[in-house]
Image (cartoon, rainbow, N blue to C red):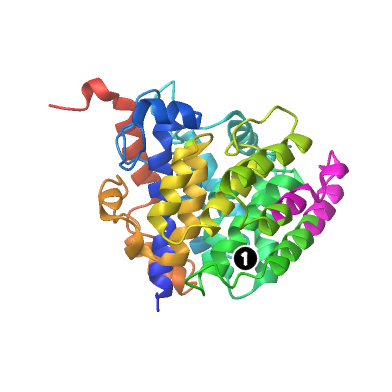
Amino acid sequence: MIEVESKIAGSLYGELVGDALGCPVEGWSSQEIQAAYGRITEMIEPQERWRPLGLHSDDGQQMLALASALLTDPLHPEEPFAQTLVRMYQIKLSKESFGLHRGTGRNFRATVQGLAKEGSSVWGAAQPSSGNGTAIMIAPLGWYFYKDLELLQNRVIQVARVKQCDVRGIAGAGSIAYLVAYAMTHETWEHLDHQGFVDFIKALENKAAEQLVHAQQLRDTTQMHTFSLGLAYMLDHLKFRRGQVLQDIVNLANQTADFRIRNPCKGYVLASVITSIYITLTNTAFENALLEMLQLGGDSDSTCAMAGAMAGALYGKDQIPARWYDSLVAKDCFDSWIHPLSQCLYPWKPDVSLETLETEWTKLSLCGPAKKTN
Ligand SMILES: [Mg+2]
């Protein structure tokens, strides 16, 4: 039996591994990856937006910020989570960097800048974004609340609303949290109750919409059950031919997205989140799931981070290939967090803070490849 601590460590480091693996080819098509690298099996140093080999980006950083928030206040993790994002933004290392945050997108920057304003409320800076921005960081809630799904549902909404006020985005986060929670007590996906999973997401969509209406943040009620419908479709076709399922995900995403989608791993939540779930559920080992995910390109740091978080929780830390784990810049750095997370201890503080670690890592990434040796 895989111990809970190994599952939490597998999910935490699995996400960092996936993020670092995906970074070098973020935004590429699968054809471009094939032409440049053939099949990628090793960590590659990102060249276009240079970063040291094995360093995670904003996806992993936010997942860690959420894990640290749970160790501070598991009843209201959204508060310390938002505060950590702001503190990391306010540490200025250079003109080009967004504080300590690496590889951020427009919506994330708008949220953090909004949160940093005096008198801002924790949910007041959420963006009407249908991206995967909360799904990529939500895994720690699955480690923490896997024994109580109703609590999990409530915490997902509390935390996701810091960044997103679109029901699709919040539902996407709920689906990753649900599967991480499932993985905490299982070693294969075989017995996953598809209907129970979809019902959980539908109920979460209802609850999230209710709260957003109350906060006058819900702009589009027609998108209410869009995510759960897409999820249900994919789960019903899990055993169909892979190329067909991926094409169906693209077609379905195009029916509700505001922009044209060609890659099943595009950042839109109905593409990237549903595809990362599909790839994770239809592989039977951590390495295979990540390799297949990586080769599809698209929002690859995020899709590989999500797949790594889910597969890592299912298979435990020992299944992360040593050649990937050993390349992580953050290798072993969060070992001391695992026990308090598994025991739900709080408030708990690590000897070295997340900000201290991230300051060093962002400095490294600002050095640039030319100055990194000798
Ligand atoms: Mg990223």
Residue 325 percent coordinates (x, y): 30, 52
Task: Characterize the local packing of mark 1: few (<14), some (14-19) or many (20 or more) Cα atoms within 10 angstroms.
Answer: few
- What residue is shown at x 29% (from left), y 26% (from top)? 367
Above or below for 319 versus 1: above
- What residue is shown at x 55% (from left), y 47% (from top)? 136
Above or below for 83 versus 49: below
Is there any visible trace of residue 132 in the rendered image? no
Residue 149 percent coordinates (x, y): 66, 70
Residue 243 percent coordinates (x, y): 58, 43
> In the picture, which quadrant includes the C terminus?
top left
Extent of the magenta region: 206-231
Most extreme residue toward the bottom is 1
> In the picture, which quadrant includes the N terminus?
bottom left
In the rendered structure, the answer to whether residue 47 lies left or right of residue 67 reads left
- What residue is shown at x 42% (from left), y 66% (from top)? 315
Most extreme residue toward the left is 374
The three-letter code of the residue at mark 1 reads: Leu
Nearest the viewer among 360 and 369 is 369
In the rendered structure, the answer to whether residue 62 lies left or right of residue 148 reads left
Q: What SS does tag 1 mark?
A: loop
Residue 280 percent coordinates (x, y): 52, 55
Above or below for 194 versus 159: below
Give the main secondary structure, helix, strand or loop, of the magenta stretch: helix
In the rendered structure, the answer to whether residue 148 lies left or right of residue 350 reads right
State yes or no: residue 190 in magenta: no
| Residue indicated by mark 1 | 75
Q: Disc 1, ligand 1: is the CB inside 8 Å?
A: no
Most extreme residue toward the front is 241
In the rendered structure, the answer to whether residue 111 lies left or right of residue 335 reads right
